[in-house]
Structure formats: structure tokens, C-alpha cells
Image (cartoon, rainbow, N blue to C red):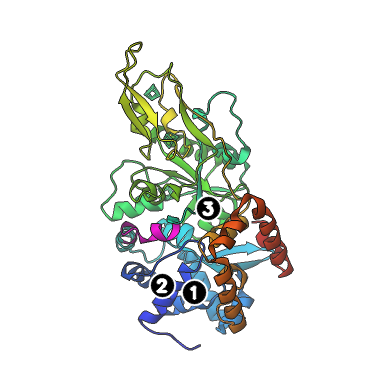
Amino acid sequence: MGHLVGKDIYKKLVQKIDAQAVRVPFNERIYNIVKALYSAEEAEIYVKMPYGLSTLDRIQKITGINPARLKNLLEGLSDKGLVIDLFIDGEYHYMPSPIAVGIFEFTMMRTQGDLDMETWGKLFHHYFEDGSLYKANFSNGEQIGPLRTVPHEESLADHVEILDYERAVHIVESAEKVAVGLCSCRHEKHHADAKECDVPLDTCLSFGMGAEYLTRHNMAVEVSKSALKENLARSREYGLVLQADNVQKGIASICQCCGCCCNLLLGMNKFGYENAIVTSNFIADIEDEKCTGCGKCAKACPINAIEMKDDSDPNTKRKKKPEINLDLCIGCGVCGLDCKPSACQLIPRKKRVIHPETTFERVILQSLERGALQNQIFDNPENIGNKAMNAILGAFLRLPPVKSALMSDALRSRFLGAMRAGVRLQGKGFLTEM
Ligand code: SF4
Ligand code: SF4
Ligand code: SF4
């Protein structure tokens, strides 16, 4: 194959990462990250391989690389979390890792091999700090993000109905395999000398296919379900936000996040993008008569959505009372965990939130919102016909009226149905089940 050398291949590599469901604007900071993580040969494979999960045979035909060499390289990339390999229908399928959940998390979860965590932690920290990644992904009112808030059930008001996919304990109990790994955001902050909290690092919980991928590559260790539930219980003690994969079926992970380290919460806290976090279907509510004005809820809220205001009511001994900014509240329930009179609780939101049913749906909707859906449909970057169709479709899908029509309540499910049918016609029906 013709080798692209020096800076060009790494620039193309960033462009390829940027063309996926989470956008990655090019600058010197991301360039330095990919240069530290990929060899030039690995970068070239990443650039040439299809966007979607593909067999070794398909990638070999597209890249023209010797099969044994290719297998070796893909396995090495998978061990580093730079490519995702999943065992489906009796053989491995490979796809390039997106930046998140992918290159960032898996790099900072690695425990084996030639590791330079300090350099990587500092490089990622430097990139997140400049804010360009948040701007590229959240500045146009995007509704679909990679993670969704899971409520602390202890904070739900009496008789509030909650579905199984919204319950952390149900996610643990129904998983085939469960594992624990390092929290990438805290690990990154630790190495960048920016970790301000005492929250432990072993808080990344994974399930099913996610647990299988991470344990196979030494990025997590398999544990019993009771150990995982004990780990989860610590999130109440530390007042952590639970965030799961933004899907209803096949949930691969639950994060336990603090407002100071979590890069998604920082999207809200530091850069002001309220849509950086997909909310739960619940919202905080305070029962005024019960509230003593202790202020614990305001202190606990990881996104500062509660403010203690002067209480001028002559009939109460309270000096202050909490006021919730309902536009900010993500429905995590952290505020209710330490409210002694149970005045602060979660109640249902008036309008239910879109949580995609499967990963397939999430990737389609997330890519559509970020102008990258054409790459999931015409996914062979080495085919000229594919490239042309990709460009035409991309221009069409990026038109604001087209995008908002396809995302609307009226058209979304028909659009997703058509996408599923198209993928099945290509013989990749397994993708629609993921
Ligand atoms: S999202 Fe939360 S738990 Fe996950 S890696 Fe970041 S801080 Fe850690
Ligand atoms: S923690 Fe409870 S009692 Fe204390 S201020 Fe908040 S709502 Fe009121
Ligand atoms: S007020 Fe804060 S802590 Fe309470 S549910 Fe909303 S975001 Fe979570």
C-alpha cells in the first residue's frame, strides 16, 4: 500500500475520528494525542478501514494488506482500545474506536503494555480544556449524547413509576457478565495533577459485550454481581451521578461521576452546554413544608442547579430555602440522598426524554445530529463510488430542515425503521440488534 508519511497520516487520522458519531475538531492538541497513541502503520489502517463493524476478510479486501499482518495489527490496536473488536456470529468484527466512548476512555483504562499514562493523561486534559470538542458536539442543541443519567432510586418520590432500563440495580442483575475498570476522567485528572476529589478510581462498571471486550483486553476485571452492587452503593456515599450508555437495551456501561472530574459534566459545569448530559425522565422537586433549609441538597448537586435563597416567610424558622433551576436539573437524585426529612425528591418530567432503544439507533441519531450519518451508510473510505455517494448524502443530511424533520417525533421512528431495513439488506442485520 502507498504509505502516507509524517504529519499527513495523523491529520487524516484525526479527520477519520472526526467523521464518526462524536466530532473531533483538528488542532495541535488532538494531533499530539494521536501521534502519541498510534504508530504510522496503525494510523494508516485506521484511516483505510470501514467505519462500521467489519470482518477481517472485508478489511483485507479494502486495505489490501497481507491478512496475517493485518490480523496482527488489528489485534494490537484492539489491545490499545484504538479499534473495537467484537465476536459476532462466529468471527471477530472490527471497527475504528470513536473518541468517546472509545479512544479516550479505553486508553485511560489500560493496565497492560507499554504505558505512558502521565503523558496521555496530560495530553487529553489539555485537549478537553480548550473546549473545542464540546463546541463541536453540543453547540447546536443536539439531543442525543453517548451517556444518559440514571436516577438514584432512593431519591424517587413514593409511587413514582420507573422502567427497568432506568434502574441501575436491574442493569447489574440482568447482565450476563459484569466487570469493573478505572474511571478514565479521574485517571486523566490524576496524571494531569488536576484531581481535586477523593473519589476512588475503580468506578467504571461494564456489562455484557462491554465487559467482555474490556476484560479480554485487560481494561477491566470480571467481578461478582454482589461485588458490583457494593461498588455501586459507594456512589451514594460519595454523591456520584450515575450515567449509563444512552440506550435502553444492551447497556454496556455505567459511570459513577463527580462534578469535578467527569468530562461530560464539565461540558455543563465549565463550558455551559446544558445538553452535554442526557437527562433521566425525572426531575428534582422540593416539598416546601418538609424542608428545614439545611442546604445539604445545594452542596451535593454536582451541577450547581440548586441555590439557597433567603426565606422571607414569617411562619418558618428557616433562614434560607433551596431553589432548583429546572432547566439545568439532569434528574440524578444526588440532592435527595442526604435530605433527612425527604423533602427533596425526584418526580417524573412532564415530557419523556428520547433514550434510543439500541446502540444502532443511538449511533444513527447521534451521527445524524452531528452531520456524520453518511459515513455509517457508505462506510468504505477507499471506494470512489462510496465516496461520491457519501458526499451527496452528507450534503443533503446536513440541511437543517432535513435534519430536524428526521429527528422530529413524527418522522424519527419511520426513519429508524428505514435505516434498519437498509442495514438488513446489506446482510448486517446483527447491527440492528446491538
Ligand atoms: S464519565 Fe464519569 S465514571 Fe466515566 S470515566 Fe468519566 S468521570 Fe469516570
Ligand atoms: S437537603 Fe432537604 S431539608 Fe435540606 S435544604 Fe435541601 S430539601 Fe431542604
Ligand atoms: S437538582 Fe442537582 S442533584 Fe438534584 S436531581 Fe437535579 S441535577 Fe441532580
**Taking 426 as reference, is 363 left or right?**
left
Report whether residue 51 is seen.
no
Q: Position of residue 353 (x, y in %)?
A: 56, 43
Amino acid at the residue labelled 2: Tyr
Report whether residue 180 is seen.
yes
CA gap between label 2 and label 3 equals 29 Å
Helix, strand or loop at label 2? It is loop
Q: Which residue is mark 3?
A: 144
CA gap between label 3 and label 1 equals 26 Å
Residue 40, above or below 241:
below
* Residue 110 found in image quarter: bottom left
In this view, the residue farthest toward the top is 315
**Taking 26 as reference, is 162 left or right?**
right
- Magenta extent: 127-137
Amino acid at the residue labelled 1: Tyr
The crowding category of the residue bearing disc 3, from other C-alpha atoms within 10 Å (few below 14, some 14 to 19, many at least 20), is: many
Q: Main secondary structure of the magenta part?
A: helix
Name the disc covering residue 106, or none.
Answer: none
In this view, the residue farthest toward the left is 193
Instruction: Tell which quarter ligand 3 is in.
Output: top left
Q: Position of residue 41 (x, y in %)?
A: 44, 79
- Residue at image position (34%, 69%) is 27
The crowding category of the residue bearing disc 1, from other C-alpha atoms within 10 Å (few below 14, some 14 to 19, many at least 20), is: many
Q: Which residue is mark 1?
A: 46
Amino acid at the residue labelled 3: Ile
Residue 174, above or below 77:
above
Name the disc covering residue 38, or none.
Answer: 2
- Residue at image position (54%, 78%) is 70
> Mark 3 near mark 1, Cβ–Cβ under 8 Å?
no
Asked whether 334 or 138 is in front, the reply is 138
Is 128 inside the magenta-drawn segment?
A: yes
